[in-house]
Image (spheres, rainbow, N blue to C red):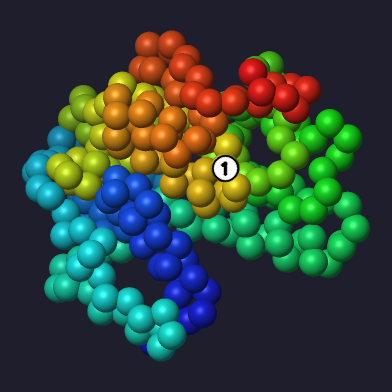
Amino acid sequence: SVSPLLATALAASLRAARLSNGAVDPTVGAAVRLAGYDDDFSKIVEDGGPITLRAWRIAGWRTVRFDAVSRRVLLPAGVELDLGSTGKALAADLAASAAHGVVKAGGVMVSLGGDIATAGTPPPGGWRILIAEDSRVAPDSDGQVICVGSGGVATSSTTVRRWTRGGTVLHHIIDPATGLPTMGPWRTVTVVAATAVDANIAATAAIVQGEAAIDWLTVHGLPARLVENDGTIHYIGPWPDPNGGAA
């Protein structure tokens, strides 16, 4: 059996696959590795020689046998898991909850590389959050600022974790239907949801879904900001403004 924390992370990834109709799938591990993301990102060679990519539908999350009570996991031979699509957001949610449990009064905001979780009472006017494609930018940089009173905010993007192989630009968001990096219209998607995990599920799913993401986000009532590859911005739902209201 796996550890309680790993079981929680695995459960979150399988829930993501279910909620996104398979757009966010933890069994893309081998596809991510074969695309060139086979080490810590800081160690990935930015520009390298050509590699061979093969289009293939991944095994899929339904092939994972997981018993939450016993914490036993059974994977088909050759299936590799990648919990990255939900792991960081889950860590943010857990950290915010744990920190609030210690401070009790007031509120907490945790930001982990583009995944933001909050807990408790926000400051007057709400939590001010800079929306950016790269989470490494300084919080006081120029850009759009939103205010949220609770929940989570997450950004998924193809513009940061990317590398070049044989002149072809690749990135880490895999389309489970092809086993290849997505080639859709969105370069960045930001979503506001009840938790950082839910926001990240929706943001990543939107990039994979392409044009269909607009209807999907609308149906689920999720405020979102979608940036096309040419920089054109689309807003879905009641996108928050700097004063804490809807845009």
Query: Circle 1 sits on which residue?
Result: 193
Quarter of image, res 51: top left
Q: Residue at x 79, y 35 (%)?
A: 126
Question: Residue at the location (79% across, 66% down)?
Answer: 101
Rendered location of residue 229, percent (x, y): 36, 17
Q: Residue furthest front?
A: 219
Residue 166 in picture, x, y percent from top left = 18, 30
Three-letter amino acid code of the residue under disc 1: Ala
Q: Position of residue 113 (x, y in %)?
A: 57, 43
Going 83% across and 67% down the picture, which residue do you hit? 102
Q: Quadrant of the C terminus?
A: top right
Relative to 218, does residue 114 appear above or below in the rendering? below
Q: Say left or right for 105 vs 8.
A: right
- Quarter in which the N terminus is drawn: bottom left
Q: Secondary structure at mark 1?
A: strand
Instruction: Depth check: give the residue in front, 109 or 195.
Output: 195
Q: Is 169 located above or below residue 177 in the figure?
A: above
Question: Is residue 211 shown to the viewer in this render?
Answer: yes
Mark 1 crowdedness (10 Å alpha carbons): few <14, some 14-19, many ≥20:
many
